[in-house]
Amino acid sequence: MKIHEYQGKQIFARYGIPIPKGIPCFSVEEAEAAAKRVSEETGIPVVVVKAQIHAGGRGKGGGVKVVKGGAAEAREVAAKLLGMQLVTHQTGPEGQKVRRLYIEQGLDIARELYVGMVVDRESRRVAIMASTEGGVEIEKVAAETPEKILTEFVDPLLGLTPYQARKLAFGLELGQDNPNAKATVKQFVKLAISLAKLFEQEDCSLCEINPLVITKTGDVVALDSKINFDDNATDRHREWAELQDVDEEDPVELEAKGAGLSYVSLDGDIGCLVNGAGLAMSTMDIIQHYGGEPANFLDVGGGATKEQVTKAFSMILSSQKVKGIFVNIFGGIMRCDVIAEGIVAATKELGLKVPLVVRLEGTKVDEGKQILQASGLEIQAADSMADGAQKIVAAVKA
Amino acid sequence: MAILVDRNTRVVVQGITGSAGSFHTTQCIAYGTQVVAGCTPGRGGESFEAAGPGGEKVVVPVFDTVSQAVAATGADTSCIFVPALGAADAVLEAVDAGCSLVVAITEGIPVMDMVRVRRALEGKNVRLIGPNCPGIITPGQCKLGIMPGHVHRPGKIGVVSRSGTLTYEAVGQLTGLGLGQSTAIGIGGDPVGGMDFIDVLTLFNQDPDTVGVLMIGEIGGNAEEKAAAWIRQNMSKPVAAFIAGRTAPPGKRMGHAGAIISGGKGTAADKIAALESAGIKVAPTPAEMGATLQSLL
């Protein structure tokens, strides 16, 4: 689950990670008041108006504006940003609508660094990465100048140790051109250790500060915050429900998640309903192999109920872009008769206007096939995955 | 011979009284698996009943702790159906009780829990399979998990996969071609887990009864790339592979927690390239997994 920059910063603050003074806003009036308040409380006339969307690259996309002309100018900028479709290299061409802003104090920046944490699968540890290349996409740095990324692995028994944090601090040469070097190193070490604690306790899957700023007075401040949570840990974090911004989510994917289904929207026109993620991915692959394009990834899972299958099928049927449907089931726990009942129920409710190819195999396959036959629905049966994929591609092209 | 499980494996099922645990234990007992104990805290003293392969009544004692179960029955292997937030602890309990093999079926375990479990298992002589996996089956001898036993046949092909139903699809194809399986293992779809491809391939390489291996991977991580390098150096038997997710969009979790292309890494294309350059034949479509393996024999 993703959250906004301002929400991430609130979490940083709880862990003692220094952040600039900032106030989230949802209207131009709030923005104007926030700008006034931030300037007054910091004594700094410069504020930054930041669009809050879940995608990165907001600065380059024109979603971050430095304002030197006071609260009135901040209001004008806010009026332009709120409601705009912000396009960044991470949003896709249609961009994302800006509904929230963050008004933040200006900083006197001396250096921009990168610090990020992620679960490293190979070592089975959480890794903390630091780089002198702040403000740049870390993947770019990893591709072009990997030697500039310093990495430490966190032993879950120990947490991030002070010596590890010092290795990063001195590796980043924080003392360079810095009259307050000693203080900066100390602050960095404290921040890194706090970040590692945050990552573990908040069940993150990603936690990035890009850029992490060293100010002209040698203070270490998180200028940005990107936190992704591990969806698997949802049930032990009731507080995440309040942080969720449904406007930032694909409504269909959200609906599916609520029903306990795994769904990803794609660009094609052949709807898929499959049990099992690997089989579902392979179904997308084989449709493409035969010249079709999948409209979605949908895994009903192993223990799906008739209601979940009905819901899944309804979601596909309701989609405007779907011109044909391929149901590919290999029943282990999943029973073919349950799938068949779900398909019949959904189709009776919504009507079937597109070609439907069903391939059933495994547990209760004969019962499943019988239910489909008896339904009177126009269904093409397939003997195998290849047969089914070819049939649906042909039916959609016809 | 097969690997890791056979007719002598003695199993304790953790979470035996839950809906998933009870359903699948019944199926495993019907298959002939030696389920000797169950464990659900607070339900110790109960009995779990099911029918064996010949219809005979099988009565399994339920215990409060895995230690009690192992002490009373000599169970050496655990199969875990405990819900996600308690499953990592269940793994640790099984290890503490002396199980040498732990098969964690549960999906949805928080990643940080598994990071801690892996740390706890360091230096211990125990094997973990999963989590988020269908389990392990040595056809005709022992079914430990949720796979449909009836599509499997005893034979000489080793199967190792990150997937569940895609594995059954592959096994169905192999069986249809007359190629039975020595052992089929689902290593799971999570980013941090137990045995990986290399761990399993090592065992298949040493197993006199396995003559070839079918390896099924998917997007996310670099386990297949590492396996490819290992196979090139060490494997003395033919390996065929299939990678799911050629058409998966980047940045999206495709069902499995571990099936995500991140920062350009973990694509199907990269994995296929690594496997092919190590001399492993990759099936072009999921319909040809069995046939691809057959062509190597």
Image: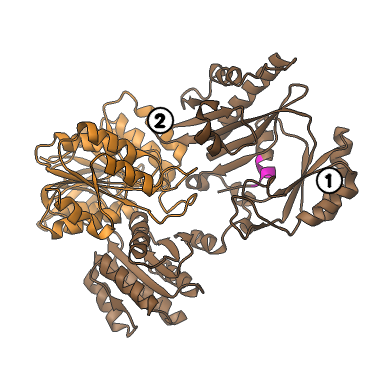
Chain colours: A brown, B orange
Magenta stretch holds residue A5: yes
Amino acid type, label 2: Ser
Q: Which mark is residue A123?
A: 2
Q: Amino acid at mark 1?
A: Ala
Q: Is residue A50 magenta?
A: no
Location of mark 1 (residue)? A34
Disc ID at residue A131 = none
Q: Is residue A332 visible?
A: no
Q: Quadrant of the N terminus of chain B?
A: top left
Q: Residue furthest bottom?
A: A376
> Of B14 and A49, which appears nearest the observer?
A49
> What is the x, y in percent for residue B119?
39, 28
Badge 1 density bin: few <14, some 14–19, many ≥20, Cα 10 Å = many
Residue A19 relative to residue A321: left or right: right
Give whichever of B20, A368 is nearer the camera.
Answer: A368
Q: Chain of mark 2?
A: A
Residue drawn at (35%, 72%) of the image: A393
Horizontal side of A223 relative to B97 (left or right) equals right
Residue interval drawn in magenta: A4-8
Mark 1 → mark 2, Cα distance in angstroms = 45 Å
Tell me which corner region of the image, top left, top right, bottom left or bottom right, holds residue A251: bottom right
Q: Nearer the viewer, residue A107 or A126?
A: A107
Looking at the image, residue A277 lies above or below residue B70: below
| Secondary-structure class at tag 2 | loop
Q: Earlier in the sequence, mark 1 or mark 2?
A: 1
